[in-house]
Image (cartoon, grey):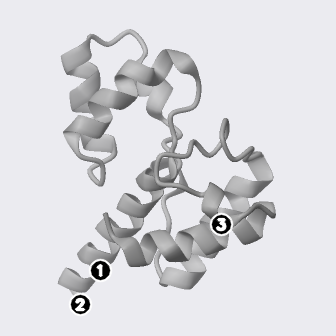
Amino acid sequence: MDSEILDRLRDIISDLINCDPQEVKPQANLVEDLGFESIDFLELGFTIGHIYGMEVDEKALFLADFRPLIHGAGHDEALEKLHRAYPHLPVHQLEQMLREASGGNVLRVDHLVRYIAHHAKIEKEVA
């Protein structure tokens, strides 16, 4: 995991929701652990785009299509759909998300770090 991105994201999130930066751990769930609300997601997406100079696909960043993608699909089909929709996440994380799906929101801080790192890498390759 990119520690530089994590440190920056930790500062962004802690400022956004007024929490101790140490609460913003890679495994922290944005909704259940950090108390994110709809407006927080909008502001975070905008801030990430601005700071990293990238066009943010908020559906991909915040895993917005996660539930519709897995609905009615078997494990292998769901995994394939998720891998296509979220190429920034490794298969082992997608499998973990499938296991945890019944527990609520699956979006964690490390998913955001991987999204930023993935898109920064792509933009560097294109330039």
Q: Is residue 96 left or right of residue 6?
A: left
**Residue 16 at x, y = what percent?**
75, 66
Q: Residue at image x 68%, y 54%?
A: 41
- Extreme bottom residue here? 127
Are there few (<14), some (14-19), or many (20+) residues within 10 Å of tag 1? few
Under mark 3, the amino acid is: Pro
Q: Residue at image x 48%, y 35%?
A: 65
In this view of the protein, which residue sits in the foreground, 67 or 90?
90
Q: Nearer the viewer, mark 2 or mark 3?
A: 3
Picture layout, residue 42 above or below residue 86: below
Under mark 2, the amino acid is: Ala
The residue carrying mark 3 is 21
Q: CA distance from mark 2 to mark 3?
A: 33 Å
In the rendered structure, are the residues bearing label 1 and label 2 in contact, judged by CB atoms less than 8 Å apart? yes
Picture layout, residue 52 above or below residue 98: below
The residue carrying mark 2 is 127
Q: Is residue 50 left or right of residue 17?
A: left
Q: Is residue 85 left or right of residue 41?
A: left
The residue carrying mark 1 is 123
- For residue 74, what is the image quadrant? top left
Judging from the image, what secondary structure is the residue with disc 3 in? helix
